[in-house]
């Protein structure tokens, strides 16, 4: 069965404003939409990188939205393919990300590594071999 659909991951974080700023600084994400809640914090911030989009929202227990920090980690890997994985990895670590697996040439023909952003989400940063 074919149908039109669009899938947009939503990253649940403790600090949506901080996460939004982080993703804008390190991934050149463009903020395209923000919905403020009653308390002034955003309930959702929509970002775009090229044709790809993702959202950031706060952890809200009453909604069942828990962050990786609440759960002791994240079982989900976000993978982004970029022209220069080393530069993106360096920007991420300069802004508080932790290297989990160093960015290196891999035997499967990619240059990639894994980082945990300051909000607990895991990212595979990948690109062409050098």
Image (spheres, rainbow, N blue to C red):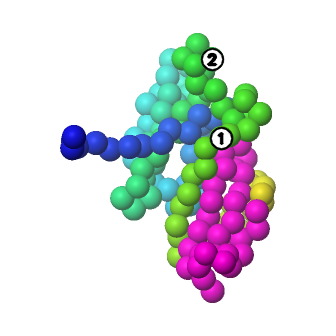
Membership of 91 in magenta stretch? no
Report the residue at 36% width, 58% height from top.
51
Task: Give how far across and how far down residue 53 sits, in percent.
Answer: 42, 50
Marks 1 and 2, Cα distance to the nearest angstrom? 19 Å
In the displayed orientation, state which residue is furthest to the bottom.
130
- Examine the residues drawn in magenta and state their main secondary structure: strand
Characterize the local packing of mark 1: few (<14), some (14-19) or many (20 or more) Cα atoms within 10 angstroms: few
Report the residue at 52% width, 67% height from top.
81
Report the residue at 61% width, 64% height from top.
125
In front here: 130 or 19?
130
Residue, disc 1: 75
Which label's residue is closer to the chain start, 1 or 2? Answer: 2
Membership of 125 in magenta stretch? yes
Determine whether, in the image, residue 96 is placed left or right of residue 130: right
Q: In which quarter of the image is residue 68?
A: top right
| Res. 1 visible in picture | yes
Residue, disc 2: 61
């Amino acid at each position: 069965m074919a149908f039109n659909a669009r899938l947009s991951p939503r990253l649940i974080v403790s600090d949506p404003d901080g996460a939004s700023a982080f993703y804008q600084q390190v991934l050149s994400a463009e903020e395209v939409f923000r919905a403020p809640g009653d308390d002034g914090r955003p309930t959702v911030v929509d970002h775009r990188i090229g044709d790809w989009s993702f959202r950031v929202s706060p952890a809200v227990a009453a909604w069942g939205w828990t962050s990786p920090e609440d759960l002791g980690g994240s079982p989900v890997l976000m993978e982004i393919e970029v022209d220069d994985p080393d530069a993106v990895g360096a920007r991420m670590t300069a802004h508080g990300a932790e290297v989990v697996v160093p960015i290196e040439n891999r035997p499967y023909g990619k240059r990639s590594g894994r980082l945990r952003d300051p909000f607990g989400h895991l990212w595979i940063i990948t690109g062409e071999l050098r």
